[in-house]
Image: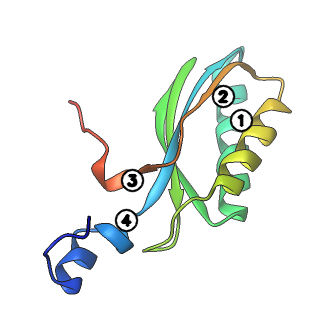
Amino acid sequence: MPSQRSKRLRKKLYLDEFAVFGFVISLKLNTENDEELDTFIESLADFAESRHLLVAGGGMKDIELVVGSALRYGSATAQDRESIKVWIEERGEVDLLELGVLVDLHQLEQTD
């Protein structure tokens, strides 16, 4: 159901046709030290950037990341999600991978 807000306001609020989609990745790594962790994260970020995506999040062994488009009103796609999944599954550092569905990143519930 379209909102009664003006197009300008919907754009400012990233609503309806201006919604920005991305996905959440939860990983359990088997890295031995900080250098291996850094190498994995940097490689993932480089791969994501090659697809015009950004990765944010953190953790040490249990990592939670949010992946979204690097473009202002761009969205991650199902193909982006699948390519990240394949890239991670090919790596030896990951013991457990949980890949979330595409969601509106501006509507994610924020917790402190």
Alpha carbons under labels 4 and 1: distance apart: 30 Å
Q: CA distance from mark 2 to mark 3?
A: 29 Å
Q: Earlier in the sequence, mark 4 or mark 1?
A: 4
Front tag of 3 and 1: 3
Answer whether labels 4 and 1 touch (C-beta < 8 Å): no
The answer to whether the residues at label 4 and label 3 have Cβ atoms under 8 Å apart is yes
Which of discs 4 and 2 lies nearer the camera? The answer is 4
| Residue at the spot of label 2 | 37
Q: Residues within 10 Å of mark 1 (few under 14, many from 20)?
A: some
Tell me the distance, in whole angstroms, between the alpha carbons under discs 4 and 2. Answer: 32 Å
Pick the residue in front: 78 or 95: 78
What separation in Å lies between label 3 and label 1 (alpha carbons)? 27 Å
Residue corresponding to mark 3: 104
Give amino acid for label 1.
Answer: Phe
Badge 2 marks a residue whose secondary structure is helix
Asked whether the residues under the numbered discs 2 and 3 touch, taking CB atoms below 8 Å apart as contact, a structural biologist would say no
Say if mark 4 contacts mark 2, CB within 8 Å.
no
Name the residue tied to disc 1.
Answer: 40
* Kind of residue indicated by mark 2: Leu
Left or right: 97 as drawn, with respect to 87 = left
